[in-house]
Image (tube, rainbow, N blue to C red):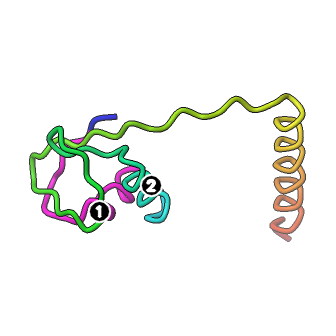
Amino acid sequence: MRLIATGEERIDRYLAKSLQEPRSQVEQLIKKGCVKVDGVVVKKGGFKVKEGQEIWIDFPKFKRVSQKMLILILNVYMKMKRYWCLTNQQV
């Protein structure tokens, strides 16, 4: 994924805003070496990007999930969704 910085800001804050993800998740990407600025790997979240700099994010590949695990995850999701719908009904 390619982004162009729109101002001067810490890279972890900029990516958290741009990706709409928690900074802790962004920090993991940075520590794993998945983020580059102008072709150079960034290793610290405090790195400051400047307007116009090119940011590349190489998301790690996901491991294959077994069919049983996928069914388990979907079941948990559906139970949580049902619970949320029941507890947030308008009266």
Q: Residue beneath label 2, please?
A: 20
Q: Please tell me which residue is depicted at 17% across the width and 41% down the height of the picture.
A: 54
Q: Nearer the viewer, residue 7 or 29?
A: 29
Q: Residue beneath label 1, please?
A: 44
* Range covered by the magenta-colored residues: 3-19
Mark 1 vs mark 2, foreground winner is 1
Label 1 to label 2: alpha-carbon separation: 19 Å
Question: Which image quarter: residue 57?
Answer: top left
Residue type at mark 2 is: Gln
Query: Of helix, strand and loop, which one carries label 2?
Result: loop
Query: Of helix, strand and loop, which one carries label 1?
Result: loop
Question: Which image quarter: residue 82?
Answer: bottom right
Q: Please tell me which residue is depicted at 83% across the width and 41% down the height of the picture.
A: 74
Mark 1, other Cα within 10 Å: few <14 / some 14–19 / many ≥20 = some
Q: How far across and down, in percent of the image, does residue 10 sit?
A: 23, 65
Q: Quadrant of the N terminus?
A: top left
Q: How far across and down, in percent of the image, does residue 31 sit?
A: 39, 56
